[in-house]
């Protein structure tokens, strides 16, 4: 079930999925709840939710930037005692099943919760569990990183155009070259050859 304040937003939801304009309906009826709002909207959204029945303790999965699990647990504590919270950050390639996600577990979650979220995130690409103190760095790398790769592809394509290649061909060549270069095993092998493993950062000391 998906909830949004307007039908315009809900029009983007996949066909066949239940929709509503009532966040409380989602919280009451669902066992796993993804919180996907702008950071400045989070407090207002939570304040608009009613406390839950004692026998209903859903798993909250936050993709809201800038809120660590401790803060999220405090905020969601108005709805349920000992809220189960997971913080994650998918990136745009998840839309085509080639994403990269990181997640961290809250204080009240368990191994079963970890297995569930790992399975869900793994279905749209690579995922890794990290401690909370690494989340901001990991989100910056995995979440914002694709934009820098797109910019690099465009720059490579521009170079091809300047050398006389048609734009479409130049873009295709640049994109496929980056695709080859981004093969996980290819990158690992290349890094080991070029940098070695003589330091904790896998780069030779100068």
Image (spheres, rainbow, N blue to C red):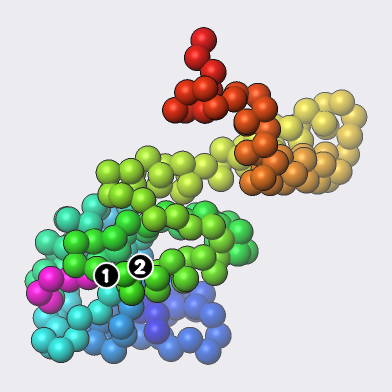
Q: Considering the image in quadrants, where does the N terminus appear?
A: bottom left
Label 1, residues with CA under 10 Å away: few <14, some 14-19, many ≥20: few
**Left or right of 35 in this view: 167:** right
User: Residue drawn at (10%, 74%), measured in percent from left and top?
Assistant: 81
Looking at the image, is 29 positioned above or below residue 169? below
Q: Position of residue 176 (x, y in %)?
A: 78, 45
Q: Is the magenta stretch mostly helix, strand or loop?
A: loop
| Res. 138 visible in picture | yes
Closer to the camera, 168 or 138? 138
Looking at the image, is 3 positioned above or below residue 100? below
- Residue annotated with mark 2: 114
| Res. 175 visible in picture | no
Label 2, residues with CA under 10 Å away: few <14, some 14-19, many ≥20: some
Say whether residue 193 is magenta. Answer: no
Q: Where is residue 60 in the image (x, y as percent from the top left)?
A: 28, 71
Circle number at residue 69: none
Q: Position of residue 173 (x, y in %)?
A: 82, 41
Looking at the image, is 20 positioned above or below residue 188? below
Q: In which quadrant of the rendered view does residue 34 lie?
A: bottom left
| The magenta segment | 80-84
- Residue annotated with mark 1: 110
Instruction: State the residue lying farthest toward the front.
Output: 198
| Number of numbered markers | 2
State the SS at label 2.
Answer: helix
Closer to the camera, 205 or 122? 205
Q: Where is residue 122 in the image (x, y as percent from the top left)?
A: 51, 65
Calculate the distance from the C-alpha at mark 2 to the C-alpha at mark 1: 6 Å
Tag 2 near tag 1, CB within 8 Å: yes
Closer to the camera, 26 or 12? 26
User: Residue drawn at (67%, 36%), measured in percent from left and top?
Assistant: 189
Q: In which quadrant of the rendered view does residue 171 lie?
A: top right
**Left or right of 45 in this view: 174:** right
């Amino acid at each position: 079930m998906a909830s949004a304040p307007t039908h315009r937003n809900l029009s983007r939801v996949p066909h066949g999925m239940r929709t509503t304009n009532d966040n409380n309906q989602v919280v009451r009826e669902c066992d796993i709840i993804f919180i996907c709002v702008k950071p400045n909207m989070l407090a207002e959204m939570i304040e608009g939710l009613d406390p839950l029945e004692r026998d209903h303790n859903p798993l909250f999965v936050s993709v809201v930037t800038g809120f660590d699990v401790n803060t999220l647990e405090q905020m969601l504590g108005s709805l349920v005692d000992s809220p189960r919270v997971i913080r994650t950050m998918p990136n745009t390639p998840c839309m085509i099943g080639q994403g990269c996600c990181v997640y961290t577990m809250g204080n009240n979650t368990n191994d079963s919760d970890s297995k569930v979220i790992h399975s869900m995130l793994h279905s749209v690409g690579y995922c890794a569990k990290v401690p909370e103190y690494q989340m901001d760095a990991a989100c910056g790398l995995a979440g914002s990183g694709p934009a820098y790769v797109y910019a690099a592809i465009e720059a490579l394509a521009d170079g091809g155009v300047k050398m006389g290649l048609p734009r479409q061909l130049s873009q295709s060549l640049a994109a496929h070259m980056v695709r080859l270069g981004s093969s996980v095993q290819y990158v690992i092998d290349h890094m080991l050859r070029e940098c070695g493993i003589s330091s904790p950062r896998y780069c030779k000391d100068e």
